[in-house]
Image (cartoon, rainbow, N blue to C red):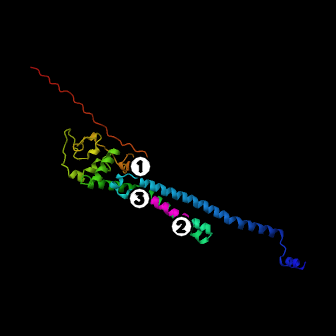
Amino acid sequence: MKKANDNCARKPLMGYNDVVIQEDESKCCSCTPSWVKTFLIFFTAIILLVALAFVGLGSYLVATRLAYIPKLLGEVAYVNHFLLFSIGLSLIAVCIFGFVGVSKKDPKLLMAFCWILGIIVVVQLATGILALCFSEFFQEWLAGRMRSTMQKSYAINVPDVDSAVDFVQQKFKCCGSQNYRDWKESAFQNASERVGQNELGFDYDTRVPDSCCIRLTENCGVLPHPSNVYHQQSGLYNCNRRSFLVTLCNRMYRDPLMQAEKPPILHWKMEPLSINLQP
């Protein structure tokens, strides 16, 4: 009895409000950590799935890239594929770091995970905004690089470039990077004899590769008829036109091919010459 009385004396009686507050605090302390842990695991799992998708998509695009693109534009044409793959790997590393922090319940690791994740999100948003703002500049740069490759490397003992240019011009129904005039100051033109007025009287002094011809025949680009050459206008400077570069970029991202506008074909009709001879 004495020990029981001593225990009662050591533990003062609590009122009803104190008991309710203690129960609420115990519930909060027991539920909040598990709820936060579940949320972090779920959120990190979503990011991990996105990262795996980035890695898979980047790997697929690199593995299935078109062989002739690096020959004309260089590896810089696929820099976005490598960036996608790299971002996916970095997100996977961050997710692993986050899972370790959640499992160990280390506040420092969780705080570091949140900061790193926030920095990655900000960098991705900034990169997307910059890519949107400088998309026109990038397209013009690619068009200039394509034009430079065609003018400097075609028909000067670079078989890879020759085959790539011929394939692209026939595949996408275009002539040059912007139009057929890109060949006017090219090494291919300088290595050829200057062509004057052809037999039909057109001052068409720019020799073009045979792959520029709509009806492909041998040496059709030596004396090209205007109706037999692709007059592809650049969509980089006129949004109402379809450029070779825009078509090519859409092909790179598996979009439907744009149909090139064909010039009207000139039909020549020979009328019989009638001579009236009267005595």
Q: Amino acid at mark 3?
A: Val
The residue that mark 2 highlights is 116
**Residue 24: where, in percent of width, then height?**
75, 66
User: In the picture, residue 115 is in which quadrant?
Assistant: bottom right
Q: Identify the residue shown where x is 32% and y is 47%.
A: 167
For the question of whether residue 176 can be seen, the reply is: no
The residue that mark 1 highlights is 250
Q: Earlier in the sequence, mark 2 or mark 1?
A: 2
Which image quarter holds the C terminus? Answer: top left
At label 1, counting other C-alpha atoms closer than 10 Å, the crowd grade (few under 14, some 14-19, many 20 or more) is some
In terms of secondary structure, where does tag 1 sit? helix
Q: Does the magenta portion include 93?
A: yes
Q: Is residue 116 above or below residue 6?
A: above
Q: Amino acid at mark 1?
A: Asn
**Residue 200: where, in percent of width, then height?**
21, 38
The residue that mark 3 highlights is 79
Q: Identify the residue shown where x is 51% and y is 58%.
A: 52
Q: Which residues are magenta?
A: 83-97
Q: Label 1 to label 3, Cα distance in Å?
A: 16 Å
Q: Is residue 94 above or below residue 196?
A: below
